[in-house]
Amino acid sequence: MAANPSTLTGRHAWHDGARSSLASARLLRVAGLTLEYRVRERVVRATQQVSFDVYERDRFVLLGPSGCGKSTLLKAIAGFVTPASGSIELDAQPIHGPGPDRVVVFQEFDQLPPWKTVLENVAFPLRVAKKLSRAEAKERAAHFLEKVGLADFAKAYPLTLSGGMKQRVAIARALAMQPRVLLMDEPFAALDALTRRRMQEELLRLSDEVHFTLLFVTHSIEEALIVGNRILLLSPHPGRVRAELNSHQYAQQSVGRDDFQEAVARIHRLLFENETKVS
Ligand code: ADP
Ligand code: MG
């Protein structure tokens, strides 16, 4: 990492008090995580020795350029990728494969089975993974559809919805599972700019209302600053931790403000300058 302590290089270098409460408990601990793909004889290293902690109610963002291993990190935490080395603990327990305590929302609009209505899409995983009765699952599904503003679309089919609405259904479905941590992999990247902004705002409102812990992946610096309260900067391929910083002071209204633009510029420098020096 760069040496100047006056810039946001070190861990917690920005402001203190990033976490809304000092009493919040550590939920997720990622330690020395190296992730690799084996492609025939070759080994592709996706991340190298990545460590971070996520606390309850955090909106923790993994930010880095395309190919730096963000999705692989999320998949490892979801339990789909086994670490080459290092560890992942949830509530101080090592994770073993996927589980309903971690739910992923992806970028793609086709993550909803098209033959199920919106309500069935949200209710079905509750029946399967949470063993809820039909009535309980429907009730909970309706509750979370209302939270994302889709109460009127319960009987619609995904094909009839816009991209933004499909992502809302995916978010409702994930939140209805009441996971320990909600994992989102560039969930708004395929939306038009206006819808994307609205979805970022809604996600922040939901996090106030529903009180979940979020691990959010993006390659957009602005989105990271808006959505996150803490941001982990990852170097280009293979992803290593460049810095960790606090961003709770920024929201949608900050965009265009001088301090926001300065933060964007500084993060840009941290991500892309001194590449040879850091790696
Ligand atoms: P990001 O999400 O940050 O764009 P990824 O986690 O998708 O990055 O990819 C990290 C690295 O791992 C990249 O070099 C990518 O080419 C490689 N990679 C991703 N998935 C696979 C795979 N299934 N097989 C081999 N290499 C992969
Ligand atoms: Mg990705």
Image (spheres, rainbow, N blue to C red):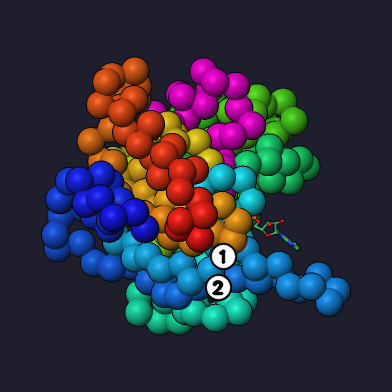
Q: Residue 34: give its label.
A: 2
Q: In this rendering, is residue 24 above or below 159? A: below
Q: SS for tag 2? A: strand
Residue named by callout 1: 47
CA gap between label 2 and label 1 equals 5 Å
Q: Kindly identify the residue that appears in the image at 73 percent across and 46 percent down.
A: 113
Query: Relative to residue 259, is residue 143 depicted above or below?
Result: below
Characterize the local packing of mark 1: few (<14), some (14-19) or many (20 or more) Cα atoms within 10 angstroms.
Answer: many
Residue at image position (78%, 42%) is 115
Q: Residues within 10 Å of mark 2 (few under 14, many from 20)?
A: many
Q: Is residue 23 visible?
A: yes
In primary-sequence order, the first of circles 2 and 1 is 2
- Vertical arrangement, residue 79 with respect to residue 93, above or below: above
Residue 39 coordinates in the image, percent (x, y): 81, 70
Report the front residue among 29 and 245.
Answer: 245
Task: Please provide percent x and percent y for residue 91.
Answer: 35, 75
- Whether disc 1's CB lies below 8 Å from ligand 1 is answered yes
Image quadrant containing the N terminus: bottom left
Say if the magenta span includes residue 96.
no
Judge left or right: residue 155 versus residue 241: right
Residue at x-position 52% and y-position 26%: 196
Q: Amino acid at mark 2?
A: Thr
- What range is drawn magenta here? 182-202
The percent position of residue 178, horizontal first and vertical second, equals 43, 57
Q: Are marks 2 and 1 in contact (CB under 8 Å)?
A: yes
Residue 117 location in percent, x, y?
A: 68, 39
- Out of 70 and 117, give the one closest to the viewer: 70
Q: Residue furthest right?
A: 40
Q: Residue at x 35, y 79 (%)?
A: 92
Give the side of residue 1 with respect to residue 106, left or right. left
Q: Secondary structure at mark 1?
A: strand
Q: Is residue 53 left or right of residue 218?
A: left
